[in-house]
Amino acid sequence: MSGRHRPAGAPARRSLRTPIAVLGVAGLVALTAIAVQTMAADANGCSTGGIRLGVATDPAIAPALREIAARWNESTPQINGSCIRVEIAERAPADMASSLATRAGGPMDVAADPAPTPSESSIPAVWIPDSVFWLTRVQGVDKNAFDIDTPSIASSPVVLGVSEADAAKLAGGGGRLTPDALKPLLTQARADEAPALRLGIAEPRRDTASLVGALVLHDALVKRQSDLKNLVGAFRQIGGPAPDTASLLKAFGRGINAAPMSEQAVARYDAGAPAAPIAALPIESAPALDFPYAILNGKPRNVFQAAVRFRAALIGGSYADILAKYGLRTADGLAGKGFPTGHGVTSAPSEIKPLNEVEQLRAVLGVWVAAKTASRVLALVDVTSSMGDTMTGPNGNTEVRLDVLRRASTDGLKLFTNDSQLGMWAYAAGLNAPKDYREVVPIGTLNQAQRDRILAAVNGAQPVPTNTCALFETLLDAYKVMKAGYDTKLSNTIVVFTDGKSNKPGGLALKQTQEQLEALTDITRPIRVILLGVGPDVDMKQLEALALTTGGHAFEVRDPAEIGSIFLQALLR
């Protein structure tokens, strides 16, 4: 006896060793059916029991992975006698990244509400996003999130999807779109000169191919910091953004004639024999989708071992034909047997460059958010007498400090969207007793009338007789006003211009100001504070201390010629 007991009233279980003569023909048939079903279950990766290997994957590669897993399961892979059951679940990279970031305690901007904290059972053992960039973003919150080995298992170049009629016109001599060729097309678009390129894009904070497209635009338009305004203009020119690539494809011929997308997306779209096929125009030196295989740390040892076994199978090159069937290349850019070609897609090897330029990508996303997101801004303008003094740059260029501010404000006003809200205060000690500031333009929606009011106020600003600056008092009052009128849908920002330091007799000390600002701070309703010190007399230590307290940034402007690019950088931080 085995020691196991049969529950009372339960029928006796027939042993598989029962003589065939006793079973008869019907019993033999039944046993044969059971055996066949058992073998089938084993061949399909033990549909129940065994080691469950949960794999969350980008939707673009999910169908291929399901077919690969089914073929792999035919070899009945096991760990210590337990079979491996691979379960593929589709998860958009942005949603999965947000979920993992929330789990680690750090929110991530993916142009959506933060994901709820996931249960441990819902966290997969393996994550395969479409780019290593997503792994990097999560590691910025949790550096130990993944096993160190994250090889690519497939690839797809990012191309410019264009109408067939425009493909030949846009391609250079090598059949590729170059940054030099792209720049005049975008310049035409900004000048409203019947642009040859009517570009569409999905939200680059969520869509990897669109992020590559945003990076390509940056490389085409920005050669120096002062050129950032060109990129802002290009982003503003783009409508939308569209929710996803499928929406971009539907928009072709109805407002756009080009959009960044993966080569696979073009091939899969054209496979449906649409009335107007889309052509894939290669982009010179553009990063590609590289589908990294990341094992999440913290899983049981047998699950980790199963994940390693599946990883070894995927990088072995045995499934190139399945990848090709779904329009994907191998990790090294080769096209397997049956790879779909036509409409610009060829079977020629493709150079695969991962999307891993992290700092540059963050900067590009910063410009994108600033260009496409409305803001609520209160500008504080120092009008003490020293603002009438001149400042001289390293090249000998001299300009009145208030004129430097006027130029920065005039150019900066162009960077805000029409649904932004802007207001302006002028400040100096006792300027509007008992207050130290005057509300020159109340905060209001930035329609043309509001733009005109702000420009008139900036151009009409004049230094007052006193050189006593009440920066601390004015900043505190501004912070209270911004907090009282906080708008959760907008970026709430205070921009401070000054050429000196807070020096009001009997006024607040720096430490008192910091303590009061800290008491006002609500991390769930952040208010950015940007401080720009203009000229050689500014107290940058004071400004940097205020920036540190508020989680903001302080910038020094010593060269009048640099005010535009510094102000733009300040707004984009």
Image (tube, rainbow, N blue to C red):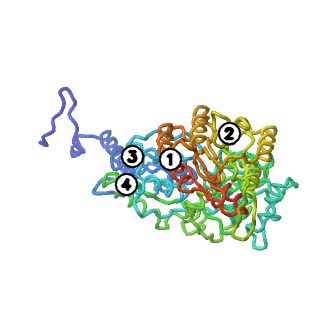
Q: Which residue is mark 3?
A: 47
Q: Which residue is mark 1?
A: 510
Q: Label 2 is placed on what type of residue?
A: Leu
Q: Is residue 556 above or below residue 450?
A: below
Q: Is residue 251 above or below residue 259?
A: above
Q: Residues within 10 Å of mark 3 (few under 14, many from 20)?
A: some
Mark 4 residue element: loop
Q: Which residue is mark 4?
A: 297
Which residue lies at the image location 81% right of the left edge and 59% below the top edge? 187
Task: Report whether 117 appears left or right of 492.
Answer: left
The span from disc 3 to disc 4 (Cα, nearest Å) is 25 Å
Q: Which residue is mark 2?
A: 431
Mark found first going from the N terminus, 2 or 1: 2
Q: Disc 3 vs disc 4: which is toward the camera? A: 4
The span from disc 3 to disc 2 (Cα, nearest Å) is 78 Å
Which residue lies at the image location 60% right of the left edge and 59% below the top edge? 361
Q: Disc 3 vs disc 2: which is toward the camera? A: 2
Q: Label 3 is placed on what type of residue?
A: Ser
Residue reaching furthest top?
9
Q: Is residue 75 above or below residue 475?
A: below
Q: Position of residue 378 (x, y in %)?
A: 66, 41
Which residue lies at the image location 34% right of the left edge and 51% below the top edge? 299
Q: Residues within 10 Å of mark 4 (few under 14, many from 20)?
A: some
The span from disc 2 to disc 4 (Cα, nearest Å) is 60 Å
Mark 2 residue element: strand
Judge by depth and name the residue closer to the eye, 210 or 415.
Answer: 415
Q: Position of residue 213 (x, y in %)?
A: 67, 58
Q: Position of residue 339 (x, y in %)?
A: 63, 63
Q: Label 4 is placed on what type of residue?
A: Asn
